Image (cartoon, helix red, strand yellow):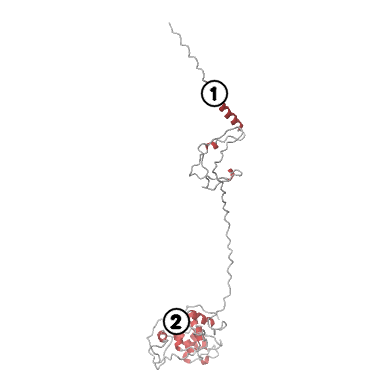
Amino acid sequence: MNSSPEPPPSRRRLEPDELVAILVAFGSIGAIFFWAIGQKDSGFDFASFSAPLLSPTTRPTSSPASSLPGATVPPEGRSTMQPSTTARATLSPEAVPVIPPTSNFQAVPVPVSPAPSATIDSAPASIASPTPPTVTAFTDVPATSWATPYIAELTQRGILQGFPDGSFQPDKPITRAEFAQVVSKAFDKPKARSVLSFQDLAGDYWAKGAIDEAVQTGFLNGYPEGVFRPDQTIPLSQLQVALVTGLGLKPQSDPVQVVNKFEDAKEVPRWAIDKIATAIEAGLVTGYPDANKLTPNRGATRADAAALVYEAMANEGKVKKIQR
């Protein structure tokens, strides 16, 4: 005999709170359904829910296309807005959820750096100005004098000096001692000769050292009787001969023909023709007061010495030649 199956258990009746929970659940589902239908025109943006939260070390970057009217984007690192840990979104079929700003948000203007512009040099182009006339500090050497540039150059180099009263006395005849001092400062030739003892040259004479050097380098010599005559003035031809001898210059052409180009060629001493011709070829002439004359026997002045010594230095490449 088979036993009959047990009857199914009777269904349990739902409690009131369970019924309320079911109604709330279905109501929420319905609300979401109707809200989703209302968003079909604007589209449902899942990116707004999936965007990562900004960490304290994350630096937001702004895009011109995403800026809203009236919103001011704070500069990098200036935002004081703290992320909310309990952000709430109110959903409705008619509005897009908006996160309200916190109360401590500060709008800071973004400084905009202007684009660098091309820099234009406003400095005017330099214009070559005419060379000013040479001026000396001496009261008796005018700017128009033929010897002014030579005197100015040599005094600036300490080769020539003026007098305590502020004058240079360019027309004063130069002595052998004074000329020895000039050449000892202007040139640095080797001392190929021995020092000579002169009867008229005391050991404490003011130019003793300069005279010894001028003799050792070959610019000057003494006289046969063993004297130097330091205070004697020098004829212009002897000054030219001294420079040619000390510099070791040699004639390049027939000396007689070179000398004969000048009107007073016959006044040149026969023993000095070769040296004077060499001086002419080397430019060791003053051309003063007449460019057609040598005036070999006139006493050389301080201005003559300045001009000829400077020309000799230019011949050595020590200074630039002055155009006359």
The crowding category of the residue bearing disc 2, from other C-alpha atoms within 10 Å (few below 14, some 14 to 19, many at least 20), is some
Q: Residue at horizontal 55%, vertical 24%?
A: 23
List x then y, in percent, for residue 102: 54, 41
Q: Earlier in the sequence, mark 1 or mark 2?
A: 1
Mark 2 lies on a secondary structure that is: helix
Viewport quadrant of the C terminus: bottom right
Residue 254 seen from this side = no
The residue where tag 1 is placed is 20
Q: Residue at horizontal 55%, vertical 26%?
A: 24
The residue where tag 2 is placed is 185
The crowding category of the residue bearing disc 1, from other C-alpha atoms within 10 Å (few below 14, some 14 to 19, many at least 20), is few
Of the pair 239 and 149, the residue shown nearer to us: 149
Q: At label 2, which amino acid type do we have?
A: Lys
Of the pair 123 and 279, the residue shown nearer to us: 123
List x then y, in percent, for residue 41: 62, 34
Q: At label 1, which amino acid type do we have?
A: Val
Viewport quadrant of the N terminus: top left
Left or right position of 245 against 108: left
Front tag of 1 and 2: 1
* Vertical placement of residue 42 versus 61, above or below: above
